[in-house]
């Protein structure tokens, strides 16, 4: 299982939110590029960056910071938050981003997502942020009536890189992933599933790996020291 240390950007700083609530913000660093370098120094071979300002403003916002992260990290970076058009995609790929996560736009226009996946094969990631199994949009501020598994099925024939599945109720809460919903998502689609939200212990991460999860995004547990990246990286081979 691959491991993505998470870097969430708000106002140019590295933060973590609880359950996607912008009012429950913890600032971990004023220098996200330095955070990226530190994760790479510890062995990370990829990073997951979220432009929280972009998610609210419906367009990429933290371009200067993201470009510094890409330039200094030296490893592939996956970016989500506010990417809503082909122009946005060309912009972020121009910043050196490896993979772009499409969330709200995927719900609004699944056919467009498939079109973009064909235009940028292997570089588009479907972002499914769910509340009780239903897709949340607009930076998690709204919840739709569409099941996350149904949306994944709609686009799975396109050459997508992966699907990031986030259970909002678990995100940033340090209470463990939603294993049942992750299992349902893996069973529903042939797209590789990246688990996001709630990973707190090594045993939880290993359970994800042993269940065949493609990758996991880990945030607060790394920042607060309840998990060590060197331990998680052992899961690149599940025989640990």
Image (cartoon, rainbow, N blue to C red):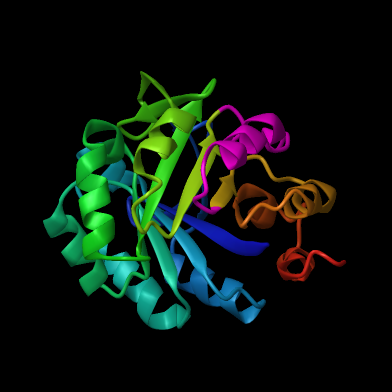
Specify the farthest residue to the left.
87
Q: Quadrant of residue 90?
A: bottom left
Tell me if I can see residue 61 in this picture: no
Q: Residue at x 26, y 38 (%)?
A: 110
Which quadrant is the N terminus positioned in?
bottom right
Specify the farthest residue to the top.
145
Give left or right: position of 163 versus 209.
left
* Relative vertical location of residue 182 with respect to residue 65 in this rendering, above or below: above
On the image, the x and y values in percent for residue 157 come to 37, 49
Specify the farthest residue to the front.
157
Q: Which residues are magenta?
A: 169-192
Q: Residue 181 colored magenta?
A: yes
Depth order, front residue of 206/54: 206
Which quadrant is the C terminus positioned in?
bottom right
Tell me if I can see residue 120 in this picture: yes
* Relative vertical location of residue 144 with respect to residue 196 in this rendering, above or below: above
Q: Residue at x 35, y 45 (%)?
A: 52
Q: Residue at x 45, y 83 (%)?
A: 74
Q: Residue at x 75, y 48 (%)?
A: 211
Depth order, front residue of 226/118: 118
On the image, the x and y values in percent for residue 179 come to 70, 35
On the image, the x and y values in percent for residue 163 come to 47, 48
Q: Residue 89 colored magenta?
A: no
């Amino acid at each position: 299982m691959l491991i993505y240390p998470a870097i969430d950007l708000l106002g140019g700083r590295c933060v973590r939110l609880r359950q996607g609530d912008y009012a429950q913000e913890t600032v971990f660093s004023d220098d996200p590029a330095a955070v990226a370098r530190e994760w790479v120094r510890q062995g990370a071979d990829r990073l997951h960056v979220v432009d929280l300002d972009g998610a609210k403003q419906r367009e990429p916002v933290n371009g200067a910071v993201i470009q510094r992260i890409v330039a200094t990290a030296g490893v592939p970076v996956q970016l989500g938050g506010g990417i809503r058009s082909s122009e946005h995609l060309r912009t972020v790929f121009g910043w050196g981003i490896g993979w772009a996560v499409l969330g709200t736009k995927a719900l609004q226009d699944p056919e467009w997502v498939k079109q973009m996946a064909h235009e940028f094969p292997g570089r588009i990631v479907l972002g499914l942020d769910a509340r009780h199994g239903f897709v949340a949009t607009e930076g998690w501020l709204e919840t739709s009536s569409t099941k996350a598994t149904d949306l994944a099925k709609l686009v799975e024939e396109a050459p997508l890189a992966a699907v990031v599945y986030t259970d909002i109720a678990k995100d940033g809460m340090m209470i463990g992933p939603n294993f049942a919903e992750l299992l349902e998502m893996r069973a529903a689609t042939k797209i590789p599933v990246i688990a996001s939200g709630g990973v707190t212990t090594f045993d939880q991460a290993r359970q994800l790996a042993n269940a065949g999860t493609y990758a996991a995004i880990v945030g607060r547990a790394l920042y607060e020291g309840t998990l060590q990246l060197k331990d998680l990286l052992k899961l690149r081979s599940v025989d640990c």
